[in-house]
Amino acid sequence: MTTFLSDTEHPEEPKAPPKSARRRSREFILQGLYQWRVGGADEAAIEAYAPEMEGFAKADREFFVGTLRGVIAQREALVSQITAHLDRPFSELSPIEACVLMMGCFEMNHHPETPYRVIINEAIELAKAFGGTDGHKYVNGVLDKVAASVRADEVAAKKKAR
């Protein structure tokens, strides 16, 4: 008797752990910011549309709304904070890199309960999933510098612990 594997069964590949509600939220925030930045969608339209997207029910809605609104409201301050660590004008970044950097910078400023390394790692994963080939490396480098200025004590403590 011949046994066939279904399309979802791949014994040689371990299953990825389920995504946390925060990670799902970050994916939807990135998509919303992209719609805002590239497509000109407004905040209200993004907030109305996102819950209809597949998987949104498992996201952290409060985090989604707070971060989306916060990034849009504070975009000028975030861009200024990020630009200090760039090797080119902010306007030359890909839309994905720009949105990921604004999200990461916002989180570093407004979510002290989330370790800076978690914020950077989440940003790297988003850049890998949605961005260009090496965009994640650029995001990593810039957010490391942002963390050193925004969360200097936390970064110093982490380095000292090594």
Image (cartoon, grey):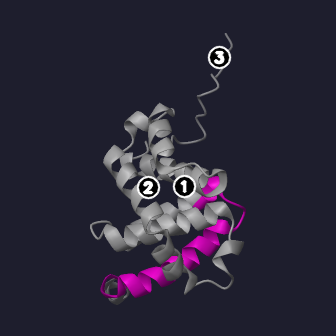
If you read the primary sequence from the N terminus, does the residue marked by circle 3 or circle 1 appear first?
A: 3
Q: Are marks 3 and 1 in contact (CB under 8 Å)?
A: no
If you read the primary sequence from the N terminus, does the residue marked by circle 3 or circle 2 appear first?
A: 3
Give the label, 3 or 2, closer to the camera. 2
Split into 4 quadrants, where in the image is the N terminus? top right
Q: Are marks 1 and 2 in contact (CB under 8 Å)?
A: yes
SS class, disc 2: helix
- Is residue 162 depicted above or below 47 in this figure? below
Kindly identify which residue carries mark 3.
Answer: 3
Q: Around disc 1, counting alpha carbons within 10 Å, would you say few (fewer than 14), some (14 to 19), or many (20 or more)? A: many
Give the label, 3 or 1, closer to the camera. 1
Name the residue at 64% across, 76% down. 90
Reply yes or no: does residue 153 show up in magenta.
yes
What x and y, as percent, mark residue 83? Answer: 57, 82
Residue 76: assigned label: none
Q: Around disc 2, counting alpha carbons within 10 Å, would you say few (fewer than 14), some (14 to 19), or many (20 or more)? A: many
Residue 68: assigned label: 2
Q: Around disc 3, counting alpha carbons within 10 Å, would you say few (fewer than 14), some (14 to 19), or many (20 or more)? A: few
The CA distance from mark 3 to mark 2 is: 48 Å
> Magenta segment, principal secondary structure?
helix
Nearer to me, 10 or 134:
134
Name the residue at 42% across, 86% down. 148
Kindly identify which residue carries mark 1.
Answer: 33
- Is residue 70 depicted above or below 62 in this figure? below
- Is residue 16 depicted above or below 139 in this figure? above
The CA distance from mark 1 to mark 2 is: 7 Å
Nearer to me, 27 or 99:
99
Residue kind at label 3, given as amino acid type:
Thr
Split into 4 quadrants, where in the image is the C terminus? bottom left
